[in-house]
Image (spheres, grey):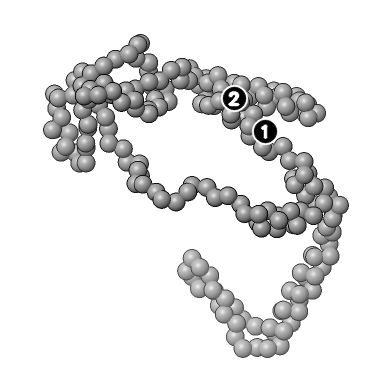
Amino acid sequence: MSIIISNKRKKSLHWKNNPKDMKKTFTFLFLFLSVVGFAQEVDLEAIHRIKQEGLNNSKVEEIAFRLTDASGPRLTNSPGYKRAADWAVQQLTGWGLKNATLEKWGDFGKGWQIEKSYAAMTAPYYFQISATPKAWTGGTNGPIAGEVTLLAIEKEEDFKKFEGKIAGKIVLVKSGANTNPTFEADASRITDKELEKMEIGRA
């Protein structure tokens, strides 16, 4: 038996025609894999307990609710993050884990959260705008008003068009997000037949 290995990144193995050597090799591999298979005993009871815990006693939905909806946005060092972290420590302790505690990982700085956000067009008519401040955006210290300018920058040369023209104005930047309309639902409802199959699989 001889093996030829190419010197490329993907190594290829080529067998020369020698039936006896090939038969011996495959017999050895079969025996080796058989021994390995018998050596690994499967604990069916443990697997059954894991399945039962996951299918019938799962707390994933409740945990997700506590960490998200109940705690609020969890930006680093924000009050929402602190609420979620404190709940996690309390819950882990309640489950019997020892020494569940919060650990400092360094000096991060100030946290940030939205207290109130509002935007609206006032002329030529009133129109409320759905807008969310970017994280760590500074406050405006009260309402501000001004003329709006759309900053449409496609290439570097476009910056010259706006030199000296945007001071004191509210600048809108063109978004790169995909805002094309969609005619398909973002979610789908499971049918009765699909639910029946799921129930049969759990039985």
Question: SS for tag 2?
Answer: loop
The amino acid pointed to by label 2 is Ser
The residue lying furthest to the right in this view is 45
Label of residue 9 in the image: none
- Identified at 74% across, 45% down, the residue is 54
Left or right of 169? Residue 127 is right
Regarding residue 104, the answer to whether it shows in the image is: no
Q: Position of residue 123 (x, y in %)?
A: 23, 22
Looking at the picture, tell me which residue is in the foreground, 122 or 16.
122
- Is 198 rendered above or below residue 63? below
- Identified at 57% across, 80% down, the residue is 14
Regarding residue 99, the answer to whether it shows in the image is: yes
The residue lying furthest to the top in this view is 141
Q: Position of residue 179 (x, y in %)?
A: 35, 43
- Identified at 77% across, 49% down, the residue is 51
Left or right of 107? Residue 142 is left
Left or right of 1? Residue 203 is right
- Identified at 56% across, 22% down, the residue is 80
Q: Position of residue 48 (x, y in %)?
A: 82, 51
Q: Earlier in the sequence, mark 2 or mark 1?
A: 1
Mark 1 and mark 2 in contact (Cβ < 8 Å)?
no
Label of residue 63 in the image: 1
Q: Label 2, label 1: how many angstroms apart (C-alpha)?
A: 11 Å
Looking at the picture, tell me which residue is in the foreground, 120 or 172.
120
**Residue topped by disc 2:** 71
- Is 14 rendered above or below residue 54? below
Quarter of the N terminus within the rendering: bottom right
The amino acid pointed to by label 1 is Ile
